Amino acid sequence: MTPPRRRRTALAAALLAVGLTTAACGGGGGAEPAPEPAASEAAVEPTPTPTREAPVDLARFEDLDRDAWAAIDRDPAAAAGRQVVVYAVVTRVFVAAAGTYAASVATSHPAGASEGTPAVLRGDPEEVGDVAPGDVLRVHAEVAGTYAGSTGGSVLLPELRVVASELVGPYDLSADVTLGAPVRGAATVVVPVTVTNSADTVMDYTVDLVATGPDGAEAAIGQARIGVLEPGQSAGAEVRMALVPADAQITLAAVTRVLP
């Protein structure tokens, strides 16, 4: 009876070997580990939407009169943060790429730099634009205090950070002058002139007339000066011109104004 016992032993050993092999391979009813996700299936964080700065409300910027600007000019640091609307005549380009300019600032549309006071403009070159000395801008700006850079002297200048600007050009002073009908005398022609001061401060005006013949040649000239005109005030004067041909045309040649 010994041979049958050996067969059962061999069968048990075979079954044990199969069980060990199955366990080593993860069998035996245990849970298989989850497969690693492919790279294309990995979770991707959404790209955040860039936030845009809220548009500046230009309606909140205050139009200044000359006295208000004079107060800022005296103490720029005390006015830091004020949002203002002014005119600026560019007098020098410090660093165009950085948007830094020297300017003469006025509170009414100026005909030239002599009508304002010096300041420094700083702003995005794309906003300020490609400006040059002599250009006149209407700007919405925030007072940044006193300019910290070199100005070539000891004067402390206001710094304005430009938020928006518009190239408006110099004020056309011919709009302030009205010519009356010429009155011819024996040797002279008298032309009545009326001047209205459009600035927001006292100004002195000079009016130049020219008489031109049919061939375009200058035949005669004349000038009148009207001084100490208050804002909005009108005053008259007479321009006398000698040796004016009967067929000459009298026109406005030039108008200038300066602070008294």
Image: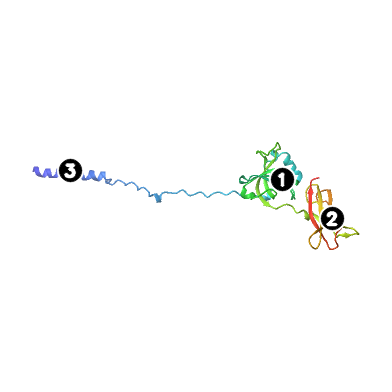
Q: Residue furthest left?
A: 1
Q: Secondary structure at mark 1?
A: strand
Q: Residue at x 16, y 45 (%)?
A: 11
Give the CA separation, mark 2 to mark 1.
Answer: 30 Å
Q: Which residue is mark 3?
A: 13
Amino acid bearing label 3: Ala
Task: Where is residue 157? Give x, y as percent.
Answer: 70, 40
Mark 2 neighbour class, 10 Å CA radius: few under 14, some 14 to 19, many 20 or more: many
Picture layout, residue 34 above or below residue 210: above
Q: Residue at x 39, y 49 (%)?
A: 39
Give the CA separation, mark 1 to mark 3.
Answer: 107 Å
Q: Is residue 105 visible?
A: yes
112 or 37, which is in the foreground? 112
Q: Quadrant of residue 69?
A: top right
Mark 3 neighbour class, 10 Å CA radius: few under 14, some 14 to 19, many 20 or more: few
Give the CA separation, mark 2 to mark 3.
Answer: 131 Å
Q: Which residue is mark 2?
A: 193
Task: Where is residue 248? Give x, y as percent.
Answer: 83, 61
Q: Which residue is mark 1?
A: 104
* Sequence-earlier tag: 2 or 3: 3
